[in-house]
Each structure stands twice: as structure tokens, then as C-alpha cells.
């Protein structure tokens, strides 16, 4: 067996540095879109929603909305229909958990959809770090952490910062305080709140708090739709 064909160690964890790595990955993939997608999906699962779906493109999400009765659509993209913002605060406190939820975003949902070859796709954020790390340690697999900024805007540095902190969390180190300081120093928090005056401050209060959500969303793609379940 050649060195390149040897199986990866079960505890190997790496961070994707370009989108192509995610598209060819076959182990466990963990998506991080910190300010929006990750926390919104976790919040939807945490709220008790039983039908949560992720779509890689707006056209697919809009087609699903026409078919899924009474569905709520979550997106920061203006889709020209009645929709909720891609807001974790709204997902948790401002919407009806009895209704189906559909999500399409600029970076998070395309990042998740890129992992079609992956054995498992999970969603991570600071809020579910301890629960996700415990799940991964109990179920070791070669793991690729995918910062969603690779699929939209590399200036969204919080995704990469969070990804590095997750490596520490999976190794049993608390890298959160340093990561939090780095995110604040980047200016991204103030930028986000300035562009999202309605819920930006309340979103950040949730996004930048570690360990308060227990859900570990797992996405399984079928016929273009990413069906979300709680892995724990």
C-alpha cells in the first residue's frame, strides 16, 4: 500500500484552506459559519424544530418553499419573498418551532453542500463547542473543519479563528478566550452589528458565548436538500 493510500488516523483533525479540499473530503466534515449559518442552524435545532433543511442555492430553497407547507425561510439573501433574516436570535426566540425551517445562505449552506462525499457533516459554533467536542471524541473519525468564508468572503476571518479554536477544543484545550479576543480585535463584530441593527447586538450576545447550546446538528444531503438532525 502506498503512503498516499494509507487510511488517515481516526483522531486526525485539519482545517480546509480552500474549497476544493471540502469537495473531495471523505471523512467527517465540520462546517463553521460563525456569525450566521452555524448559530442559526444550532438555534433551530435547539428550539425543537423537527424539520430543518439546508439548500445550496436560492433557487432550490425557493422551489422547496413552494412545496413545503407553512415553511419558514431563513436567509440574509433578499429572496423577494416573505422570509426571516439569517439570525440565531430570531431562530431561537422569534419564530414558531412547530413549522418547517428552510435555510439558504451566502457561505454556510454552500460550504455544507460542498461536503457531498463526506461520511458525516456537522455544524459547529462556540455555542455548541463542548457538546460537539464530546460527540467527536466519543466517535473518532478523520475530520476536516471547513470555514465557510472559503465559499464567499475571506475577510470573514471569524470563521477561520473559530476553526482554529475548535482544533484546540477537540484536543482538550480551551482556546476560546484567545479566539474571542482575536475576533473582537478584527473589527468584525462592530461591522456585523452596524449592518444588522434589528437583531445584530442580540445575535452577537448568543454567537460569542461558549457552551450554552447542547445540539450538534448533522446534515444529510438527499436530492439536493440537506436534512438536519441532532446527532446527540
Image (cartoon, rainbow, N blue to C red):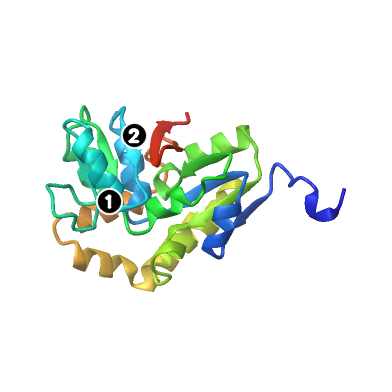
User: Could you tell whether 157 is left or right of 11 in the image?
Assistant: left
Of labels 2 and 1, the one closer to you: 1
Mark 1 residue crowding within 10 angstroms, few (<14) / some (14–19) / many (20+): few
Q: What residue does disc 1 label?
A: 59
Q: Residue at x 56, y 48 (%)?
A: 169
- Give how far across and how far down residue 41 sits, in percent: 34, 42
Whether residue 87 is visible to the viewer of this picture, yes or no, is: yes
- Give how far across and how far down residue 183 sits, in percent: 40, 66
Q: What residue does disc 2 label?
A: 45
Of residues 178 and 90, the one nearer the viewer is: 90
Q: Residue at x 62, y 44 (%)?
A: 27
Query: What is the tally of numbered marks visible in this picture?
Result: 2
Of residues 105 and 12, the one nearer the viewer is: 105
* Residue sticking out furthest to the right: 1
Whether residue 173 is visible to the viewer of this picture, yes or no, is: no
- Label at residue 106: none
User: Could you tell whether 119 is left or right of 155 in the image?
Assistant: right
User: Could you tell whether 221 is left or right of 99 in the image?
Assistant: right
**Can you say whether 114 is above or below 66 in the image?**
below
- Give how far across and how far down residue 185 sits, in percent: 39, 72
- Cα–Cα gap, marks 2 and 1: 24 Å
Pointers 2 and 1 in contact (C-beta within 8 Å): no
- Give how far across and how far down residue 82 sits, in percent: 12, 47
Amino acid at each position: 500500500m502506498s503512503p498516499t493510500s494509507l487510511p488517515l488516523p481516526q483522531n486526525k483533525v485539519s482545517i480546509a484552506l480552500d474549497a476544493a479540499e471540502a469537495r473531495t473530503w471523505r471523512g467527517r466534515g465540520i462546517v463553521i459559519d460563525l456569525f450566521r449559518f452555524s448559530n442559526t442552524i444550532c438555534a433551530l435545532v435547539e428550539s425543537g424544530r423537527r424539520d430543518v433543511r439546508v439548500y445550496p442555492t436560492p433557487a432550490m430553497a425557493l422551489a422547496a418553499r413552494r412545496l413545503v407547507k407553512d415553511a419558514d425561510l431563513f436567509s440574509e439573501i433578499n429572496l423577494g419573498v416573505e422570509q426571516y433574516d439569517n439570525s440565531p436570535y430570531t431562530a431561537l426566540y422569534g419564530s414558531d418551532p412547530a413549522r418547517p425551517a428552510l435555510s439558504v445562505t451566502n457561505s454556510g449552506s454552500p460550504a455544507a453542500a460542498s461536503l457531498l462525499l463526506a461520511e458525516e457533516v456537522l455544524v459547529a459554533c462556540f455555542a455548541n463547542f463542548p457538546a460537539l467536542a464530546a460527540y467527536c471524541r466519543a466517535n473518532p473519525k478523520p475530520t476536516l473543519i471547513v470555514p465557510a468564508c472559503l465559499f464567499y468572503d475571506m475577510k470573514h476571518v471569524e470563521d477561520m479563528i473559530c476553526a482554529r479554536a475548535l482544533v484546540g477544543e477537540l484536543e482538550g484545550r480551551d482556546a476560546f478566550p484567545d479566539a474571542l479576543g482575536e475576533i473582537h480585535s478584527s473589527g468584525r463584530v462592530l461591522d456585523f452589528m452596524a449592518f444588522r441593527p434589528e437583531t445584530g447586538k442580540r445575535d452577537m450576545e448568543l454567537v460569542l458565548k461558549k457552551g450554552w447550546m447542547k445540539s450538534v446538528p448533522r446534515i444529510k444531503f438527499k436530492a439536493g436538500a440537506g436534512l438536519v438532525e441532532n446527532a446527540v
